[in-house]
Image: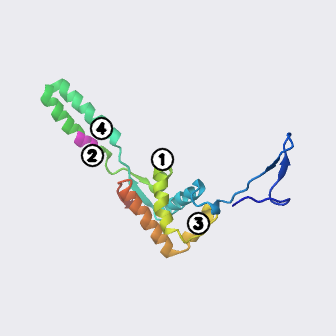
Amino acid sequence: MCLRVGDKSAARRCSPEGVFRVEIVCRRAEFPGMAPRMDDCVRLCCEVGADQQIKVAVKNSTKGAVLAGGTAFVGGMLGGPPGIAVGGAVGGLLGSWLTSGQFKPLPQILMELPPAQKQKLYDQVSAVLKNVAWTDAAQLIALVMGNAALRQQVTAALLNYVTTELRSEVRYAD
């Protein structure tokens, strides 16, 4: 348990009712499932991605859908039912062409992930880090970046996550 009682480490205070309260002081390392550990892993992945200059294709499906819908509408107005089909097909191809190949730096993508996706990333990366003990993100980054084999394993787990979970294309900067 992470309760420390004593004059030096935790304070005992008396409430107005005369009941004692004890402060609870917890260290993150004792609770591997806490959010700060997940944030440490995400920061590590950002550092690894930045170090290797990894970029990820961002799929802007909303833009493509709006473009396809808009051209289908215009085609329908100009050509009736066949115009809808032609406009939708042309708009779909145009939307696909316009939205393909847009790459963003991996750290930017990772920081924008929703909590559920960050948890999945943490699960994959923490499997690699199961025998590594750390207290904060800076120490974790130093440990991993200083060990080539561990850095390679974290990179492999990160790339696996990006390609399978995010279904994104990966590119290394030239």
Q: Residues under labels 2 and 3: Cα distance?
A: 41 Å
Among all residues in the image, which is located at the extreme left?
A: 82
Q: Which quarter of the figure is the N terminus placed in?
A: bottom right
Which label belongs to residue 140?
3
Tell which circle, 3 or 1, labels the residue nearer the N-terminal end: 1
- Residue named by callout 1: 114
Amino acid type at mark 3: Leu
**Horizontal and vertical percent position of residue 46:** 51, 58
Choose top left, top right, bottom left or bottom right for residue 3: bottom right
**Horizontal and vertical percent position of residue 171:** 37, 60
Residue at image position (34%, 39%) is 62
Q: From the viewer's perspective, is the residue at label 4 or at label 3 nearer?
A: 3
- Residue named by callout 2: 97
Amino acid type at mark 2: Trp
Stretch in magenta: 92-97
Tell which circle, 2 or 1, labels the residue nearer the N-terminal end: 2
